Amino acid sequence: MKLNLFTAVFLLVWSSVGLAADPELRMLSEHPVDGMRGGNLSGLAKCGGDLWTISDRDDDQIYKLDTRATEWKAEAVLIDIPPVPQDSGRTLAMKTQSFFRSLVGNGALDFEGITCDSGQNRYILSETYSAILKISPTGGTAWLPISSRMLTTVRDAGLATHANALFEGLVVTGLLGSEIWLAGERQKRGLVKIKRRLAVPVDYTWYCFIGCVLMAEEGLAPQPPQFPGSRLVERDFSDIALFNKKLFLLDRNAFKVCRHEMLTGQQERCWSFAADALVPHRQYSSRHGLTEALLVDADGAWIGVDNNFATRADGESRPVVWRFAAPEGGWDGNP
């Protein structure tokens, strides 16, 4: 009760100084997703005209989404998983956590992000190993060679230090797809950029160069007032999207989409989606936000819910994807 009272006072003060005025996004539609064997929708990507998703409980398949009806159908596409890269940089706690996760039937790789490049290659992020699987348009698979120093550099900045709190999303950009942005989840959360050297001879290794950790922050923030029993919780990121040379981060516990500058990672402005996402019939019994997938385009945003097999108030127990309209004036509006 004391914590809730403190949170209420904090929210009141927050609002009174004009810091809680993030505009609300308007939900246009919602789409339950049938056919995901492991449930737990954990990312969204648009490759050409197709939408793709992943489950953090499935290691051997990804899903192409049939979006022709209100209720979407997930069509499984089997993938061949090569041996995981050398297991460097993981702590004993991380290895133990992933071992027990695999014993209870959860995905040992813990896929938490999916994106595409201009060549229609798909990239899948394994949170367990902080590794990235590249899937070619013809289905060929290979793990990207990432320097073993990457995790050391990231952890020196305070990111990726806790089991199951590593990287939660990725996007590919740059000349010839030479840059990858990673969203660090929590305790601390942040932004990391890894790159390939574009030189002759070609170097295919991905490095964390000086300044690759663009931001790292920690602490508590209030859940939106619409959240039942709103309280202070860990700041976190659960996905990242790229649109019009800006990064957009899914601030899961705050129920916000926030725009960040690419060069410095600085947050520029945020939009809340709490008003429509937290109407009574869409609420879950979880004490935290459950959104884990984000796509942004000129017309709006797709936000996906990883419901962890939970059933919400109206009885819906499948993963759900929401479509929100772009804010008035577009995503490029000034703060």
Image: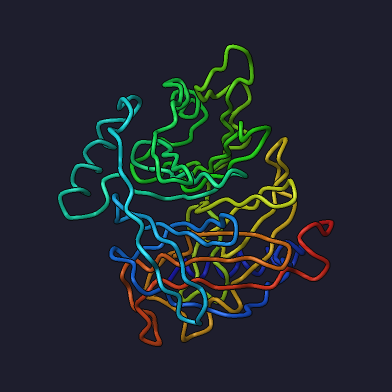
| Observer-nearest of 162 and 105 | 105
Instruction: Name the outermost residue toward the top.
Output: 201
The location of residue 54, given as percent across then percent down, is 40, 57
Image side of residue 8 versus residue 309, left or right: right
Q: Is residue 123 above or below residue 106?
A: above
Color scheme of the displayed model: rainbow
Going 76% across and 63% down the picture, which residue do you hit? Answer: 17
The location of residue 50, given as percent across then percent down, is 54, 61
The location of residue 73, given as percent across then percent down, is 41, 73
Going 71% across and 36% down the picture, which residue do you hit? Answer: 264
Q: Quadrant of residue 140?
A: top left
Q: Quadrant of the C terminus?
A: bottom right
Q: Is residue 167 above or below residue 259?
A: above
Q: Quadrant of the N terminus?
A: bottom left
Instruction: Name the outermost residue toward the left.
Output: 103
| Observer-nearest of 212 and 222 | 212
The location of residue 193, given as percent across then percent down, is 59, 33
Q: Quadrant of residue 8?
A: bottom right
Image side of residue 261 versus residue 4, left or right: right
Going 25% across and 31% down the picture, which residue do you hit? Answer: 92
Going 45% across and 59% down the picture, which residue do you hit? Answer: 53
How many numbered circles does the render carry?
0
Q: Quadrant of residue 71?
A: bottom left
